[in-house]
Image (tube, rainbow, N blue to C red):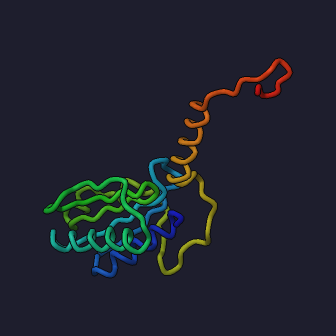
Amino acid sequence: MDSLKLALLCHELADNKKAEKIVILDVRKISSITDFFVLVSGSSEPHIRAIITEIRGSLADDHGVRPASVDGEHPTAWQVLDYFDVIIHVMKPDVRERYDIEGLWGDARRIDPKNPPAEEKETRKPAAKKATAKKAAAKKKSAPKKKTKAGGEPKG
């Protein structure tokens, strides 16, 4: 699943649990840490927990996608799910206002889930492809070299 589809799906899942002020920020052109932030407000700690459970559970069960990292344990006013190319912040309104992530990333394009942009070429390799490429390169380096005759033909 590409990062835009994942961000849109996270928006939909948060909306399923009546999350408030859901915003998707496209940071692909201004940051190398991720492609999208999904910012979500929950009215209380149980509400935040319900939103997090919906996103994590649905992505894992229906799509086989699990977060690389989770920050913030229950009960908390701010939890973060890191899916490499999409990072979801779920927080209480007062915490969201205090840290003002939308202001911090003010140059980021906002994505309208009702009218998402057309499929765009990835500006970076997806995390899974990066990991696979690194493993292949490491394997190639560690592979024993074949011995050859003076003419370049394999021995034996």
| Residue under the image location 53 percent in, 79 percent down | 115
- Relative side of 38 to 113, left or right: left
| Residue 10 place in picture, x, y as percent | 39, 71
Single out the residue that lies furthest toward the top: 150
Single out the residue that lies furthest toward the left: 75
Quadrant in the picture for residue 126: bottom right
| Residue under the image location 44 percent in, 63 percent down | 25
| Residue 2 place in picture, x, y as percent | 53, 64
| Residue 137 place in picture, x, y as percent | 59, 38
| Residue under the image location 29 percent in, 76 percent down | 20
Does 150 appear above or below 91? above
- The quadrant of the rendering that contains the C terminus is top right
- Relative side of 45 to 84, left or right: left
Nearest the camera: 143 or 128?
Answer: 143
Single out the residue that lies furthest toward the front: 156
| Residue 70 place in picture, x, y as percent | 29, 56
- Relative side of 97 to 44, left or right: right
Does 12 appear above or below 85? below
- Relative side of 86 to 49, left or right: right
